[in-house]
Image (cartoon, rainbow, N blue to C red):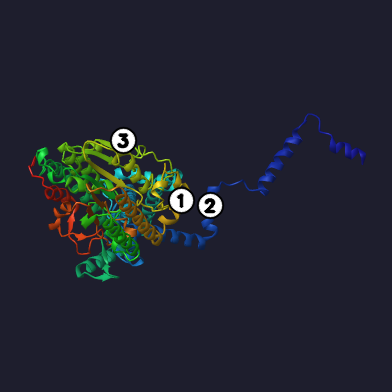
């Protein structure tokens, strides 16, 4: 036994290490047999279909259905939030039928290229529809690719002022990511559907033929379902509308440039401008978002109506009388500067390019007419202006007081840099109340009624205003913009309160500081956004002229405006662009045309 043990443990002469190597090889072979080689994750996933055929087929069909739903949804998507209803998607889109036919006749590589382009086209269609939804919701009109890109930075600045820089940045990044995500998903969906159609050509061809026949039949017979045509060409129609809108805008720019050169009062001598207002302190004041809805909507009208009636009575006790009517604004829901420039220039300025064109020229504004006479000092009070504003020259303002010139040390109220009451008091202290050699023409823009209408300032004693620090506690106790802007009912309620605050601030200022020579013209720049004023709201805004001197109002007696600050529902309605010429003629100006 000991001999066997020694023999077993001792290597044979001349074979040192040979047994060890053999054993290692045998162990390795054994290990390979017992343990499979590790497979890649991709291989494992590929074999999942074999191991779970029913689940794989269900996933395959579900993915195909989702791809088809995405494509059909993009082709049928409306461009307004109110129209996004399930019945709007019960249509047969012609673009889907045509896409299927094209896919079936193309070879592999061209088919892939066509699928990618189709997906990118759906991305563009979805993007413009979403932009339309936003513009319709806030501005009461669709997106214009030729004009509206310039408004996007303003929109970001508004979000920053309202909800903070972090939210604004997140919104901007989120918008870019959303577009890229839509593009990726749409292209993936169209490529997948193209592959499905190519693998089932016979059935796909029969289906396309059947769908095409049904579409043509429904179109020829005018068949409808849920109030809309079954045969749809919504996608192509939407892109066609946007293309035509862009072309029309470019043509309009050239035509408007010529229109702006013609001016009924362009060559009127200074001594023939506004002779019937000489010696008067004239104030043109715009109240932000002061629209007809504030006086007629059942939620806002009761409070605003009481405010206007109270203001009329208080001003009458102070010796003032008023006349009021309606103007149809060139803008809706925003872009206030378009309303300002339309009223003052006598031109219909309903987009940014028109605004740039007219402000780059020398078309006579109503405010500049006062400057041209040499009989008035002219100033602008604009608490909403926080950067260089070269338009002051076009408006004919000798001096501009912006957000940094009024001495305010209190908090901002969302977008508004300061409460209207403070801005008016600063105007009185720094401008209107000072002795001067000439009467004053003032152009004042009030901002407290700017959306999102939270938090809102409250009236304090006029002697308590100081540097505005008194508003600190009011701002902190106010509602949060994020709580109001997302709630339609709250937005309407707070909007109405903001108009009451702005109108009361202005009428109390006039009671307190108005003189026998004060003439106040105040009006709205536009209606509030569609979510507040309503999807079918018009563009009318109230306008009032207030004065102590009865001769001032006698000059506009033939306008048939309503007595007081609240215009009747059937009071005359003019386009806002008609106001300049009517005002100039009413107060004795003689037309001498230029240009044209």
> Which residue is denoted by mark 2 in the rendering?
45
Q: Which mark is residue 445?
A: none
**Quadrant of the rendered image containing residue 281:** top left
Q: CA distance from mark 1 to mark 2?
A: 62 Å
Crowding around mark 3 (Cα neighbors within 10 Å: few <14, some 14 to 19, many 20+) is few
The residue located at (21%, 55%) in the rendering is: 328
Please give the name of the residue rendered at 35% of the width and 64% of the height, measured from the top-left corner: 299
Mark 1 or mark 2, earlier in chain: 2
Q: Nearer the viewer, mark 1 or mark 2?
A: 1
Which secondary structure, mark 3?
A: loop
- In the rendered view of the protein, which quadrant contains the C terminus? top left
Figure check: 288 above or below 220? above
Residue 125 in view, yes or no: no
Badge 2 density bin: few <14, some 14–19, many ≥20, Cα 10 Å: few
Image quadrant holding the N terminus, namely top right
Residue at which label 1 appears: 474
Most distant residue in the top direction: 14
Question: What is the spatial separation of the Cα atoms under label 2 and label 3, in whole angstroms?
Answer: 61 Å
Q: Does residue 5 appear left or right of residue 183 in this picture?
A: right
Residue 15 place in picture, x, y as percent:
77, 31
User: Can you see residue 570?
Assistant: yes
Pointers 3 and 1 in contact (C-beta within 8 Å): no
Question: How busy is the neighbourhood of tag 1: few (under 14 within 10 Å), some, or many (20 plus)?
Answer: some
Between marks 3 and 1 in the image, the one whose residue lies nearer the viewer: 1
Q: Total marks drawn?
A: 3
Q: Nearer the viewer, mark 2 or mark 3?
A: 3
* Nearer to me, 541 or 198: 541
Q: Secondary structure at mark 1?
A: helix
Residue 388: give its label.
3
Query: 314 above or below 14?
Result: below
Residue in front for this viewpoint, 24 or 494? 494
Of residues 277 and 46, the one drawn nearer to the viewer in this rendering: 277
């Amino acid at each position: 036994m000991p001999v066997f043990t020694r023999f077993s443990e001792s290597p044979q002469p001349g074979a040192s290490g040979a047994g060890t190597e053999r054993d290692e090889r045998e162990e390795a072979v054994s290990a390979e047999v017992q343990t499979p080689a590790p497979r890649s994750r991709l291989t494992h996933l590929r074999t999942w279909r074999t191991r779970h055929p029913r689940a794989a087929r269900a996933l395959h069909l579900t993915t195909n259905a989702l791809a088809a739903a995405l494509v059909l949804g993009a082709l049928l998507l409306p461009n307004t939030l109110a129209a996004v209803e399930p019945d709007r998607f019960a249509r047969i889109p012609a673009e889907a039928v045509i896409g299927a036919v094209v896919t079936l006749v193309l070879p592999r590589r061209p088919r892939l290229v066509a699928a990618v382009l189709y997906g990118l086209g759906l991305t563009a269609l979805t993007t413009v529809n979403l932009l339309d939804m936003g513009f319709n919701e806030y501005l009461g009109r669709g997106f214009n690719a030729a004009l509206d890109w310039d408004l996007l930075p303003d929109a970001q600045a508004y979000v920053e002022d309202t909800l903070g820089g972090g939210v604004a940045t997140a919104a901007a990044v989120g918008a870019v990511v959303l577009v890229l995500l839509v593009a990726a998903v749409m292209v993936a969906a169209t490529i997948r559907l193209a592959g499905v159609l190519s693998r089932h050509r016979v059935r796909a061809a029969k289906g396309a033929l059947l769908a095409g026949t049904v579409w043509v039949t429904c179109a020829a017979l005018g068949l409808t379902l849920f109030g809309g045509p079954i045969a749809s060409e919504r996608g192509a129609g939407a892109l066609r509308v946007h293309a035509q809108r862009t072309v029309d805008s470019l043509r309009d720019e050239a035509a408007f440039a010529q229109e702006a050169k013609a001016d009924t009062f362009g060559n009127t001598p200074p001594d023939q401008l506004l002779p019937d207002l000489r010696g008067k302190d004239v104030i043109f004041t715009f109240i932000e978002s002061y629209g007809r809805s504030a006086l007629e909507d059942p939620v806002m009208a009761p409070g605003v109506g009481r405010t206007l009636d109270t203001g009329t009575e208080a001003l009458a006790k102070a010796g003032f009388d008023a006349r009021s009517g309606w103007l149809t604004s060139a803008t809706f829901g925003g872009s206030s500067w378009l309303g300002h420039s339309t009223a003052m220039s006598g031109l219909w300025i309903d987009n940014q390019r028109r605004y740039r064109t007219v402000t780059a020229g020398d078309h006579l504004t109503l405010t500049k007419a006062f400057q041209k006479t040499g009989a008035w000092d002219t100033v602008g009070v604009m608490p909403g202006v926080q950067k260089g504003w070269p338009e002051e020259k076009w408006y004919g303002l000798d001096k501009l007081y912006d957000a940094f010139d009024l001495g305010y040390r209190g908090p901002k109220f969302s977008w508004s840099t300061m409460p209207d009451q403070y801005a008016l008091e600063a105007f009185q202290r720094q401008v209107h109340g000072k002795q001067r050699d000439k009467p004053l023409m003032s152009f004042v823009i009030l901002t407290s009624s700017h959306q999102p209408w939270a938090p809102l300032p409250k009236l304090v004693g006029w002697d308590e205003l100081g540097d505005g620090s008194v508003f600190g506690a009011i701002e902190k106790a106010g509602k949060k913009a994020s709580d109001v802007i997302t709630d339609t009912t709250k937005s309407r309620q707070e909007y109405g309160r903001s108009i009451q605050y702005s109108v009361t601030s202005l009428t109390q200022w006039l009671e307190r500081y108005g003189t026998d020579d004060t003439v106040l013209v105040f009006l709205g720049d536009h209606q509030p956004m569609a979510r507040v004023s309503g999807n079918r709201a018009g563009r009318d805004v109230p306008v009032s002229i207030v004065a102590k001197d009865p001769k001032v109002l006698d000059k506009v007696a033939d306008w048939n405006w309503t007595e007081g600050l609240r215009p009747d529902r059937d009071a005359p309605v003019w386009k806002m662009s008609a106001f300049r010429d009517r005002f100039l003629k009413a107060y004795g100006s003689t037309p001498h045309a230029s240009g044209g």
